[in-house]
Image (spheres, rainbow, N blue to C red):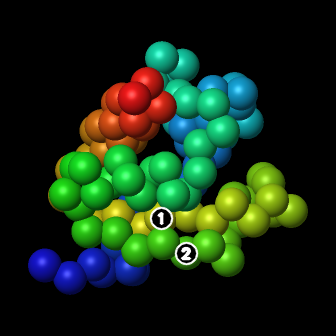
Amino acid sequence: MALDEDTAWVLWPEYFDAKRSRDQGRKVRKNLAVADPTVELITKAVEKLELEYKVEMERSYPSNWHGHKGRILVQKTMKKSQLLAKVGQELSKIQRS
């Protein structure tokens, strides 16, 4: 199944950043957040979940427009809250290893 960029979920590194509060854009629980998440790290997590994705490095999180960290588009196969939790769990596993 090909990635439909128009309907794909968008994952920003800021969603998983343990240094950010919910008001600053963190979307996962604190225990699923990691220090200094990168697009590359999130890509590894998405690959482990065997999801289709596309990396867009030239993009910036709207409230952090000066920091070009990029984003990942992920095929919609589940609710976004489920996707964020699963990616957060994988990120935690990756950083522990």
Residue contact between numbered discs 2 and 1, judged by CB atoms under 8 Å:
yes
Residue neighbourhood size for the residue with mark 1, other residues' Cα within 10 Å, grouped as few (<14), some (14–19), many (≥20): many
**Going from the N terminus, do you reach mark 2 or mark 1 first?**
2
User: Residue drawn 49% across and 50% down?
Assistant: 41
Name the residue rendered at 71%, 27% in the picture: 19
What kind of element bears circle 2?
Answer: strand
Name the residue rendered at 51%, 58% in the picture: 40
* Furthest-front residue in this view: 97
Q: Nearer the viewer, residue 4 or 57?
A: 57
- Viewport quadrant of the C terminus: top left
Which of the image's four quarters has the N terminus?
bottom left
In the picture of the structure, the residue carrying the numbered disc 1 is 72
Which element carries disc 1, helix, strand or loop?
Answer: strand
Residue 97 in view here? yes
Q: Is residue 48 left or right of residue 11?
A: left
Q: Is residue 27 left or right of residue 70?
A: left
User: In 3D space, how far apart are the residues under numbered discs 2 and 1 (Cα atoms)?
Assistant: 6 Å
> In the drawing, does residue 68 fall left or right of residue 77?
right
Q: Quadrant of residue 7?
A: bottom left
* Type of amino acid under label 2: Glu
Front in this rendered view, residue 29 or 38: 38
From this view, report whether residue 68 is shown above or below residue 88.
below
Residue that extends furthest to the top in the rendered view of this protein? 31
Residue 15 quadrant: top right
Question: Tag 1: residue type?
Answer: Ile
> Is residue 36 shown above or below 73?
above
x and y percentages locating residue 6 in the rendered image: 39, 80
CA neighbours of label 2 inside 10 A, class few (<14), some (14 to 19), many (20+): few
- Where residue 79 appears, as percent x and y from the top left, is 27, 47
Q: Which residue is mark 2?
A: 56
